[in-house]
Amino acid sequence: MRRRSAAALTALATLTAVAATGCGSDDEPDPLRGQQWAVNSLKLPDAWSTAKGDDTVIAVVDTGVDPDHPDLEGRLVDGYDFVDGDDDPKDLNGHGTHVAGIAAAHTDNGVGIAGGAPGAKIMPVRVLGADGSGSDANITKGIVWAAQHGADVINLSLGESGLMARLLKGGVLNDAISVANSKGAVVVAAAGNDATLLQPYELDTPVLVVNAADENGQPAEFTNFGAQDAVAAPGVDILSTLPTYTAKETLRNTTGYGRLSGTSMASPYVAAVAALLHQQGLSPTEIMGAIRNTAKNPAQSPKLGLGNVDAAAAVRAAAGGN
């Protein structure tokens, strides 16, 4: 079976204008930081005073990553390409590079954006091709490979039409996720973008499913929902890195930055929070518990699951605070 990445490219007309301001001076540590509404919504700056994800590896199991992007260069550890069967997981689509930047782009480096876990490293694992689709077999191999090669957090921004229906009881990814968890990795997965009520995994699969929210903290109109103990995070008009060369998502823009919307964008923000908690010494079960227990859903919206993630509250809880 084939699966696709879970995102939709938006605001193409503004990409060039956004990227034109991508480099700045020493008094502008991240020139595009002011356009990253999600960073403040998640209360990440407050969390960074305690943890930045140091000594943590986030595997981006996706379309690969641009290895030479100025906001990602030096942040990558060795990965693998299961599409071409080699050790060069270069992104020919753009989706994986966008996900990687959300999770752990360079921060305070005078260029572009701020990543959610500024101290973490990215492990690029390419399981989706240039068209954004990939096989169950390669995705399964990618998850297990990442866990076997030192990933502490594994992000699965997979979930476009038809994906989650094939992850129901008996789906092959359930076992792969369980293997990864047994090796000490936290698996974070996008809920999907079909605006559908769905329980995507077997109930005992140790995975943290992420729905998407907008700038007002309300459910994104496209988000799937209904997964057991899911949480929500920003997923609408999310600014991040894109390949600096021509790829599927950069046919009209190779300047390195742009906006995407989808649960694909929400998931790596939660993966970043998981990286902050990993630095604090928590186990996968404790990390998922801290994120879930501090999520906020005062209106009890079912489409937000347990609620919007609060990075500062999760980090305080991990440190024994209130």
Image: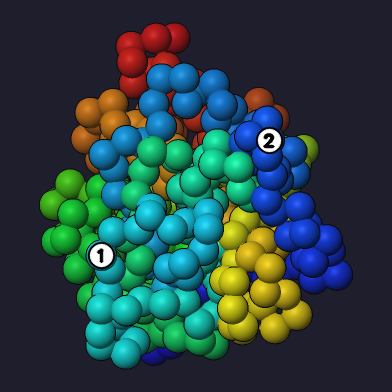
Task: Give percent across and percent down for residue 192.
Answer: 55, 65
Q: Amino acid at mark 2?
A: Glu
Task: Give percent across and percent down for residue 319.
Answer: 33, 15
Query: Closest to the observer: 166 or 108?
Result: 108
Q: Which numbered dot is residue 78?
A: 1
Image-based side of 56 in relation to 229, left or right: left
Image-based side of 132 in relation to 217, left or right: left
The image quadrant that residue 201 belongs to is: bottom left
Q: CA distance from mark 1 to mark 2?
A: 31 Å
Q: Residue at x 13, y 52 (%)?
A: 183
Q: Is residue 107 above or below residue 228?
A: above
Residues at circles 1 and 2 in contact by the CB criterion of under 8 Å: no
Q: Is residue 306 above or below residue 64?
A: above
Q: Which numbered dot is residue 28?
A: 2
Question: Farthest residue in the front direction?
Answer: 25
Q: Amino acid at mark 1?
A: Asp
